[in-house]
Image: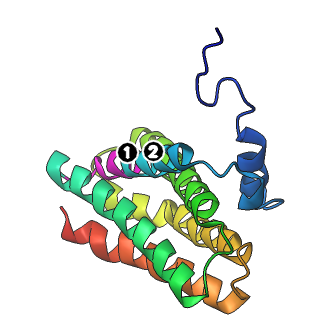
Amino acid sequence: MQIKIPYLNEELPLKALLDILKFEGGQSELPDSKPLMNGAVGAYALTQTGAQMFEHSFSGSVLFGLISAALLYGSTMMLAKFTGGLGGRFVKTLTALGAMGSVAALVYIALHLVFAIALPPPLPTGKLLRFLLFPIVVWTVFIFSWLYRHIKVRTIPSFVAAGVYVILVDMILSPLLK
């Protein structure tokens, strides 16, 4: 009798995720797996929660993580509706968006810790960190628009969709949930 453990008996999608990080591949190489999608979106919610812990209360951070994950799901669903569907790639697209959003949040957390240790407290650390970590926000827009381009959304609408999502989450929702 063979024991089947999901994702341990089959090849992990790490190569596909690395190709997306390098802007060399798309989500079509990912497996069409709802548990993987749920894991990626859950990881996105968890890492977004962790990224907000530096400046927000615990409850505000958890609420931010849950709302941002729900907005990611909802915005992808709306994009699918307005573009005539994702060609059967909704699960793969949401998996890739969740995974790349998690990577961006982890990089944000790591750099936040490095800069917070390097900058002494009398400096305006919060404002300085937001300025220094802004390229991660821009990178998130680029990676999300890259993924949208791989589902046959034109260039300008993909940048607009990614930009609106990132602005809504990082610049509007984040200050509201302190």
Residue under the point 32% across and 55% down: 65
| Image quadrant containing the N terminus | top right
Which residues are drawn in magenta? 47-56
Q: Is residue 16 left or right of residue 3?
A: right
Rendered image: mark on residue 46: 1
Q: Position of residue 18 (x, y in %)?
A: 75, 47
Is residue 40 shown in magenta?
no
What secondary structure is the magenta-colored segment mainly? Answer: helix
Outermost residue toward the front in this view? 1
Rendered image: mark on residue 102: none
* Residue bearing the label numbered 2: 43
Residue under the point 45% across and 76% down: 75
Above-or-below relation of 121 to 70: above
State whether residue 79 appears in this view: yes
Q: Are marks 1 and 2 in contact (CB under 8 Å)?
A: yes
Above-or-below relation of 127 to 42: below
Q: Is residue 162 left or right of residue 69?
A: right
Instruction: Tell me the amino acid under the disc marked 1.
Output: Leu
Give the SS element for disc 1. Answer: helix
Residue under the point 24% across and 50% down: 62
Give the SS element for disc 2. Answer: helix
Q: CA distance from mark 1 to mark 2?
A: 5 Å
State whether residue 124 appears in this view: no
